[in-house]
Amino acid sequence: MTSSARPRPRRSRRRSVHASRVALVYDRWAGCYDASPNITRDLDAEVLRRVPLDVAGRDVLELGCGTGKNTAWLGERARTVLGLDFSVEMLARSRRLVRAPHVRLVRHDIRRSWPARDASMDAVVGNLVLEHVRELGPIYREAARVLRPGGQLLLCELHPERQRRGGQAQFTDPATGRTVRVTAYRHTVGEYVNAGIGAGLRLRHLSEWLEAGALRDAPPRLLSVLFERTRDGRAARPNARLRGRSVRRSRASPTGRPR
């Protein structure tokens, strides 16, 4: 190496910088996240309540718990809830909302090994978080690690078609009036499905969701995938075929800022 050459930054360093930047944006968003109209947020909450996910009396790990919009609902049903998020301000609001002793909220970058033992969870829930993660494989492998046999993984994300058309997490900063966009990575339906299969999970349910009142030719707003951990942990073939387009129209509010 010559004296003028610069060493390449370590990957872990780049990941840390990215996480810090995204967390800081969500820190700014936290103050108005629940109050501002947001179709995507409201539809996501409805999806969680409608998919065939069994959390009653179970141990649940929530990825990207944010302000607790879904944590409170999970806490009312689950035996325990471990909520992870890397935004200090989001977690502060979640802690004010959810005070139950069986709900534990932890600041954590979900791209790193999760603070949960092997085979200690019955369900892992992730909502509107993976667009901020470049590589999906490690997330699915961690889910497979912490899930008990027969445990479920639910992911609900901004639909890839929305991303292709320029949609991403964003908000209007009340202090400046400017639109702030959060760093996002594009993923395909195939990536969401195949990463789970590659981690030894079995696809049980896949749906595309669109809010009530949307135009008939509007693309789906959200994609949800529900996986199950197999008994032996080996890669499993999906039991659902992706044919055509099946869009579920929900009763979410037709007002708000779309992603």
Image (cartoon, rainbow, N blue to C red):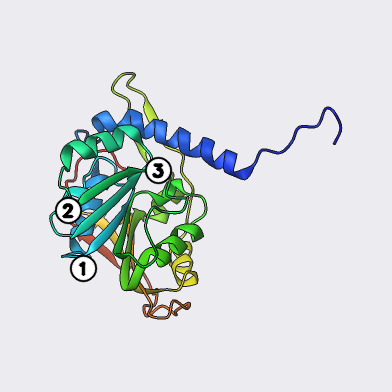
Residue under label 1: 54
Identify which amino acid the numbered label 3 is placed on.
Answer: Gln
Nearer the viewer's eye, disc 1 or disc 2?
2
| Residue at point 41%, 51% (across, down) | 130
Residue 87 seen in the figure? yes
Q: Is residue 253 left or right of 184 when viewed as pictured?
A: left
Identify which amino acid the numbered label 1 is placed on.
Answer: Asp
Q: Earlier in the sequence, mark 1 or mark 2?
A: 1
Assess disc 1: are there few (<14), some (14-19) or many (≥20) residues with their C-alpha within 10 Å of its C-alpha: some
Assess disc 3: are there few (<14), some (14-19) or many (≥20) residues with their C-alpha within 10 Å of its C-alpha: many
Outermost residue toward the top in this view: 176
Assess disc 2: are there few (<14), some (14-19) or many (≥20) residues with their C-alpha within 10 Å of its C-alpha: many
Q: Distance between the residues labelled 2 and 3?
A: 28 Å
Outermost residue toward the right in this view: 2
Q: Nearer the viewer, residue 195 or 61?
A: 61
Residue under label 2: 75
Q: Nearer the viewer, residue 241 or 34?
A: 34
- SS of the residue under disc 1: loop
Residue under label 3: 168
Q: Is residue 67 left or right of 12 when viewed as pictured?
A: left
Task: Give percent across and percent down for residue 51.
Answer: 22, 65
